[in-house]
């Protein structure tokens, strides 16, 4: 087989692989839509999305508390994790001595490899205990007794913030490193300090990559299940404070799918449709932002 024939074979293999990936996504989306759409049509999209009561035994399916809970813990994770992740990325890309980098980078990679159930155990034993102590010692007069157990939006946000760090750090560091060296050299030549160069030149130039890292980290937080189940409290009600227990969309599916039947199963699949659409929109947003960054460079 000559070189050109081998090239065509490799191209066909790669093309088939790409089609398999696309078909897999289409099949998964189609299956979830097929199973979940009947209950959305039966209940009504508005009532299903914005209903505040989830009572499967009474055939009442409103997932608004879970939608709010999902975005609440995700927003909290972004507030806590993104500044730390971006700061660590800039440090590794521009400031870290080689000896420090040899310690920090493996630590970041290790964070990415830890199973989510281990994060959940850490949250239950350490984070929840600390938050419960704060609630009972300093906030006992302000919070209801059921809010003084440590299981809360804040606990889930802290654990998710730790879990998204590898994604935010790695992608943000690559974005900072991809900025042409001429930008930094020109800034320093004009009399700017190293710090001024970092926050006025390098970070703005790498902003599209950093934003893509944030969006992908958000998708990671939205899709997390086990760790959130273990620390969030899993109460199907709209959280009124960061100390309130909460249930997310993924947690709702994982907790109830094992014993659900009939319309209850279909409602959980419909919950999956909503989650699938949210994740798809976030990934599309990340792709668009990344492409804009490439076109600018």
Image: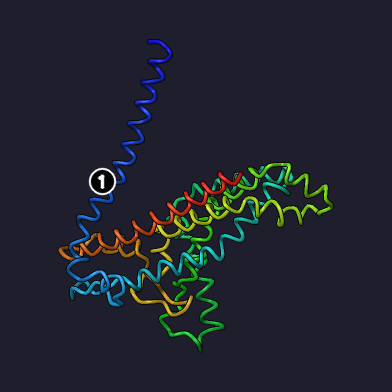
**Closest to the observer, 201 or 34:** 201
Q: Farthest bottom residue? A: 141
- The percent coordinates of residue 162 (x first, y second) are 53, 58
Q: Farthest front residue? A: 295
Residue at (47, 79) in percent of width and height = 241
- The percent coordinates of residue 33 (x first, y second) are 24, 56
The crowd level at tag 1 (other Cα within 10 Å; few <14, some 14-19, many 20+) is: few
Image: 123 above or below 58: above
**Closest to the observer, 62 or 106:** 62
The residue where tag 1 is placed is 27
Q: Farthest left residue? A: 262
- The percent coordinates of residue 129 (x first, y second) are 50, 71
Identify the image quadrant of the C terminus: top right
Looking at the rendered structure, the secondary structure element under dot 1 is helix
Q: Could you tell me how many numbered marks the image carries?
A: 1
Q: How is the image coloured?
A: rainbow
Residue at (47, 85) in percent of width and height = 143
Image: 35 above or below 231: above
Residue at (51, 48) in percent of width and height = 112
- The percent coordinates of residue 3 (x first, y second) are 43, 13
Residue at (36, 21) in percent of width and height = 9
**Closest to the observer, 147 or 242:** 242
Relative horizontal placement of residue 253, taking residue 240 as reference (left or right)? left
Relative horizontal placement of residue 115, taking residue 41 as reference (left or right)? right
Image: 133 above or below 123: below
Q: Which image quarter: residue 15?
A: top left
Relative horizontal placement of residue 14, taking residue 176 as reference (left or right)? left
Q: Farthest top residue? A: 1
Identify the image quadrant of the N terminus: top left
């Amino acid at each position: 087989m000559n070189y050109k024939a081998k090239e065509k074979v490799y191209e066909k293999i790669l093309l088939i692989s790409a089609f398999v990936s696309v078909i897999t996504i289409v099949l998964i989306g189609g299956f979830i839509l097929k199973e979940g759409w009947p209950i959305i049509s039966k209940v009504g999209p508005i009532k299903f999305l914005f209903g505040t009561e989830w009572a499967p035994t009474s055939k009442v399916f409103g997932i608004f508390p879970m939608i709010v809970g999902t975005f609440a813990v995700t927003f909290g994770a972004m507030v806590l994790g993104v500044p730390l992740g971006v700061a660590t990325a800039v440090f590794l890309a521009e400031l870290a001595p080689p000896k420090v980098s040899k310690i920090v980078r493996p630590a970041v990679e290790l964070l990415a490899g830890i199973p989510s159930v281990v994060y959940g155990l850490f949250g239950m034993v350490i984070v929840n205990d600390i938050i419960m102590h704060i609630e009972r010692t300093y906030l006992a007069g302000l919070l209801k007794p059921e809010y003084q157990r440590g299981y809360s939006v804040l606990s889930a946000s802290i654990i998710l913030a730790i879990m998204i760090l590898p994604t935010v750090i790695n992608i943000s560091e690559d974005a900072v490193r991809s900025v042409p060296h001429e930008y930094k050299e020109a800034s320093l030549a004009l009399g700017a300090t190293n710090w001024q160069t970092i926050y006025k030149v390098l970070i703005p130039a790498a902003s599209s990559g950093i934003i893509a890292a944030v969006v992908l980290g958000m998708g990671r937080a939205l899709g997390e299940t086990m760790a959130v189940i273990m620390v969030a409290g899993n109460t199907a009600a709209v959280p009124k404070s960061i100390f309130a227990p909460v249930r997310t969309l993924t947690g709702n599916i994982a907790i109830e799918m094992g014993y659900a039947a009939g319309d209850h199963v279909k409602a959980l699949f419909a919950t999956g449709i909503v989650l699938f659409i949210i994740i798809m929109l976030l990934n599309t947003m990340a792709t668009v932002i990344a492409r804009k960054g490439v076109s600018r460079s």
